[in-house]
Image (cartoon, rainbow, N blue to C red):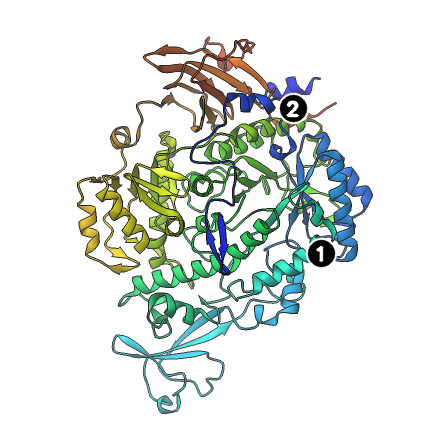
Amino acid sequence: MNTQRIIKNFIYTVAGGILSLGTTGCSGNKAETTDSFSTLEAQFSNPSSEYRTAPFMVWNGKVTEIEIDRMLKDFKDAGCGGAFIHPRPGMITEYMSDEWYSLYRYAVDKGKEMGLDIWIYDENSYPSGFAGGHVPEDMPESYNQGQGLELTKTDLLPDKTDEYFIILKKEGDKWADITNALSQHKKAKGEYYLYKKTYLGKSDWYGGYSYVDLLVPGVTEKFIDLTMKGYEKTIKDEFGKSVFGIFTDEPNISSPGGLRWTPDLFEVFRKQWGYDLKPLLPLLDEETGNWKQVRHNYMETLLQMFVDRWSKPWHHYCETNNLKWTGHYWEHGWPQMNDGPDNMAMYAWHQVPAIDMLFNQFDETNPQAQFGNIRAVKELRSAANQTGCNRTLSETYGGGGWDETFKDFKRLGDWEYALGVNFMNQHLAHMTLTGARKYDYPPVFTYHSPWWPDYRELNDYYGRLSFVMSKGIQKNDILVLEPNSTLWSYYVHAGSSPKLMEIGTNFQAFVTTLEKNQVEYDLGSENIIKDLGKVENGRFIVGNASYSTVVLPPMMETLNKPTFNLLQQFVEQGGQIITFSAPTRIDGAVNDELAGLLTGTTVTSLPELSKDVIARYFSSDNFRITFNSGNLYHHRRRFADGELVFLVNSSMDEVVDGTLSTQGKAMLEMDALNGEIYTYPSSKEKGILSTSFRIEPAGSLLLYCSDKNPKNYPSAPSSPSPASATGTRRTSRRYPDSSSTVIG
């Protein structure tokens, strides 16, 4: 049976040793674009390897040239464009040995011969940073100084206090540091706060050592040196050529117990905020005094240390060596911030920002969900828009199970692409499934899966989709500030705050409501705004992106000082602010200046995000989508002679019937399943181009709305089905369960 028929039926500058973020680290996405429809025509039917999918090529056994040959040939035959070579549990070949680098060189050469791009995965498994144990072995201070401060409260000092690092005594509404004056407090009752250092635990996972403290100066540089010197020696001549870049996986600054700490935290904190954190440590657990300010300042400090000591060195290394830095953090814990205070701020330093989107449980309500979590993907796309990056990657599908179908694959992939992903990295393609390896987060993107002979069709589809979604620009006019600076005041390392989850859940609902009402917007990280923000001609500018409207979401209490300063300028120049909250704090401290800002003539305060509010303040007269039933998402990209509109129905059982109105003269359908281009029926009145569409469950529709009269393309062949028997224009093809695609 014909496989095609089966499936169709179913920034940066370095000066004086100081690194600063600019918008030159990414390429291709400028404030305006010269890309046109002819750009898309050139490669649409058969996009180059750069735009095709690239799975994790899992080395999890004895690696041999024969196995490398087999896997790369399978990837090529399946329509992949490259691979990320990923060491994984079960690997027998010694990591970073001479044999390892020799085999890596062989894979690079073989990939180059076959037209496949190879990417470096920077760790022996994950999380990135310990180099398979080599970093802690060479640099003991990376793990043996402590990373947390665990609190014990007592009303009487113990006889032995040597194990405690800091001892405070409450005196009225303050605390005194008595660590070096304990003798006078022995046997004296009081309120004592005893802080003991905690350490990252040792494990075979980390080569018998422990994970490392990425906040210690020099740890990242040591990691880069140990990891990359072997690759530099063996494959540096291919950096930026057949070796595209480096993937880092889930680096984090989680606490091993108690408050997150690092040896120079107090020094950095004092330098930034002008006061001593040590006697205020209790406020990081207790809600008293100026606890909101202290917590905010503390989390802001951790964030900037993480950016400075992890992101900037990697960004610098990749810029210097003509490599693209990609990879992801743990973005699914938000609004809990155990792993990092602001993932979006970290994305800004990647040449190819990335996330992971695993499992197959669709959930639009939980802020800690994966599939369905609109906020997580919008953070990625927004950071890319602002820093000028034209590619965004997602590590996708892992943990979906052996029974995940083609329909599932397409539904998840399309949903991500509509929200802004344009580079698919499949998780995982195992070298072997011997023994327990078969339980390592299936599905498996190799011959082990019965649908593998048919998988080329999906790879071709996402190659075409990645290509067109990497061209042009997304120009959103609305900036929605994230409430991270408010969340910091409610975050507790040693527990959970109901208020924290309330704010997170509320923001998740806010963003989801905007998206499902087809509002076009970016999210704003205040850390990125600090580095790239300015106001010009009544526009709020963040790097390459420019906005006429800034939105303060519900429950926002705090703005960072740089954000506040820019918003003041913005209002003075006539910029529009829409606020669903009334922040009273700057950098966590109560500040009366905010009241003046929020009463500005161009500031609109609204009680809630209703359909009427969306229609009045968030809609465009020049672009409108209406629909009923289903679960519709869209992505719009601007070109020099028109715009690309990608429509996705993420429902598994409901059809979407809708209409699209936009500017233009003619409409074309770009069929990403077969690479063909068709004339799409539309009508035109007073410069507005209109059409109706029907999108089946897990279906999609890719349209180009041209400002010109393009050459005549044929109409799409009809494909009658029960879902389209009404006579409405067919716009999508079904994907059946993968069980229907088994060759036999």
The extreme bottom residue here reads 184
Of pointers 1 and 2, the one earlier in the residue sequence: 1
Q: Quadrant of the C terminus?
A: top right
Which amino acid, by three-letter code, is at mark 2?
A: Ser
Q: Are marks 1 and 2 in contact (CB under 8 Å)?
A: no
Give whichever of 267, 59 is nearer the camera.
267
Give whichever of 569, 294 is nearer the camera.
569
Q: Which residue is rendered at x = 76% and y = 50% of the image?
A: 61
Give whichever of 117, 510 is nearer the camera.
117
Separation of disc 1 and disc 2 at Cα?
A: 46 Å
Residue 522, percent across and down?
Answer: 39, 39
> Which quarter of the figure has residue 590?
bottom left
The residue to which callout 2 is attached is 740
In this view, 696 is above or below 129? above
Q: Which residue is rendered at x = 41% and y = 75% of the image?
A: 152
The residue to which callout 1 is attached is 230
**Disc 1 packing (10 Å; few <14; some 14–19; many ≥20):** some
Q: In the image, which disc is placed on residue 701?
A: none
